[in-house]
Image: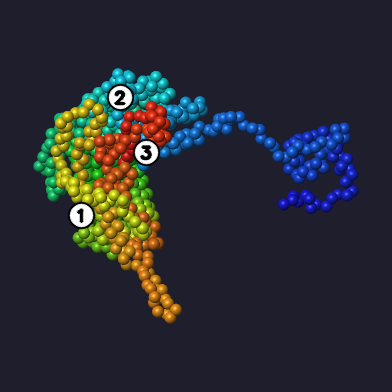
Amino acid sequence: MRPAVYNRPGRVSSNASSVASSVRTNDTFDAILSSPTSSRTSFDSWNSSPRRVEYGWQRPAPIKQYRRRRETGELFAALPDEVLGLILDELKILHLKPGSTSCATCMMRDMCSIAISARKLCKVARVALYEDIQLVGSDSHVQKKRYKLNFGSRLVLLRRTLRSNPELAAMVRSLKAPALPQGVPLDLYQNLVASVVMACPNLERLIGFHQNHDYSFNRLFHALSTRRKLVEMHWTLEPSQFQRKRRLSNAAALLNSENPNYKEAPGDLLPQQSEDFLELHADWEHLKTLSIHCLPGATLTPVSLIPDIVSRLPALRNLHLSHLPFTAFNDANLLSLPSLETLTLSHLPGVSSEGLSSFVRRPSSRSIRKLILQHMDVDSLPALSQVLSNLTALETFALVQNCTPLMPPNEMIWLFPYLASPSLRKLHWDITSHKSSASLADSVLARSISANGFPSLRILRTPNDPEGIFQALCKPMESIEMGNDQFRGLITRCTSRPSPPATPTTPSTPKTPTKTPSFGLSFPMDDQLFPSKVSTNLSQSRLAAQSRLEAARQTPRFIVNVMGEDGSVVENYGIAGFIGQVESKIRYCVTPDEGATDENGGLVDISDVLGDGGENLKVEGREGCTGRWNTYSGNVVDKKDRERWFHTERGRWRHVALP
């Protein structure tokens, strides 16, 4: 479109004067455009500018500017470090994502190559390399021979680098130490890891290397207690050698005479042991995640110890408590907790339904976004109703237990929805007591969902759904089962063994190997007994849901009749046989969370966090990475690249975090 100035009528009377004035100037075209009158059209500004005659006519500069050719690396040098950091983060994801054929060693090798490729990349690559250090698997035999070290050669070299370069040491935020090498004394290896921790002043978390605490002095836990910026800590407590089991004659009068858990409890800790454990939390002002798991026979006493610990953690947002005896945690301790975002309560016999109802009614409890109750034996439906209605910010809720919550004898439900939460987006519901039919609590929840009691609900996982009442409320699915579910069912039936007791009271005896090999890694957590009540196996849930889906396809929703020319029915067939509701926004989930297993019902358990995470190559069917996944094919080329890409076979470790 032409500018509006072209349609203006010309000024005939002043045409000659305008032409004469146009040649009386020595100003360039760029100066005209930069003048205050440049906001007008080009012809107006040209005619209004005074010009001198002696310079004559000057050709205007072209409007199109030709850019000069960029020098090599000029555009790369202009990129900010934040953009390069994001690129390297994506490279990390490609190496470490689930299903990748690469490993942490290959990722660090690529980061080193990037660091020496350009000076500008060196700074960013060093941050990506040292910010999250992952040392997975066993050390190389060549490296141990070169440095004449029997174990921990990578940790020794890392410690030397961090001590000699404080700038690199300040970058370290997360450290994954290798598992304990076989044949190495535990105290020596813990001291080596502790020395590396002491070389990282800004360390936030130590992952992958989990050791038990027996209330005796330990250099590793002492080193962690001095890291002021620590944000995550997991305690696995063993019974102290000074503890003795005690039988409580007045336990029935204290809590509940019908529960056998209250008739026997571990003995109290010594006062000095309690004070020393409390002092370990004194400098953790930035700690956000704390988990405490007691092995059989362990405890935390006095009963005020956990509230005292929490009071020293002003930044605490995520709390996970597992298998604490009733002498260590009860309803009073629950009511003393601060404002949290995530709370996991697992196997806590000291917490009752009344205490849980009182806890959720506090104003400080409204900040909870994720609540997980595992085998808490909540026996009251009104208590669950108060949990869902009072926690206004709740987005994820999980309930796993054997007993069925019931209504009080003199109460009944008149209106639905009885269970309701306007903010809940993900629900895990597993009542394991009823295997063949839906329980009363299942029916109440299903009717509450159908009555729009959960308008924001998007994911529903109910491993124990024998009648398919929850599957019928979700969006239809084409297929549910996975490829190996049928074979896993056969393997489970062939290799079934009795489950551990529900509430063991004696510590387990570690397995004693008949022959200790001189190589490989040791995973002591595999020998520990994590007492846990049974959860529904998700693989069996998928098979049951798939069978219900196939049965629903035999009953079509619509019948198509093909009519002939004479009006008779030539053919008829049914279509759209499915189970569920098309208009529903809820997804029926029968897959485990990231890092969880089907055997635990899909929820991340403490055994998953303290497990090997894929590092142990002795597990049947697990293959490691040797660094040759990106080599060329062919014998000659492969032989040339062997030394370049090959490294010691190591497992593909994945970090598992508590929900």
Residue 80, how many percent across, how many down?
Answer: 53, 33
Residue 440, how many percent across, how many down?
Answer: 24, 60
Q: Which residue is mark 3?
A: 101
Q: Nearer the viewer, residue 159 or 275?
A: 159
Q: Nearer the viewer, residue 441 or 143?
A: 143
For residue 141, the mark is: 2
From the viewer's perspective, is the residue at label 2 or at label 1 nearer?
Answer: 2
Distance from the alpha carbon under mark 3 to that under mark 2: 23 Å
> What's the amino acid at mark 3?
Thr
Q: Earlier in the sequence, mark 2 or mark 1?
A: 2
The quarter holding residue 570 reads bottom left
Asked if residue 73 can be seen in this view, the reply is yes
Q: Is residue 55 left or right of residue 618?
A: right
> What's the amino acid at mark 1?
Ser
Q: What residue lies at 32% left-to-right and 33% top-to-bottom? A: 650
The quarter holding residue 529 reads top left
Mark 1, residues whose alpha carbon is within 10 Å: few (<14), some, or many (≥20)? Answer: some
Q: Nearer the viewer, residue 168 or 156?
A: 156
Distance from the alpha carbon under mark 2 to that under mark 1: 53 Å
Distance from the alpha carbon under mark 3 to that under mark 1: 41 Å
For residue 27, the mark is: none
Q: The residue tagged with tag 3: helix, strand or loop?
A: loop
Q: Which residue is mark 1?
A: 433
Q: What residue lies at 58% left-to-right and 29% top-to-bottom? A: 72
Q: The residue tagged with tag 1: helix, strand or loop?
A: loop
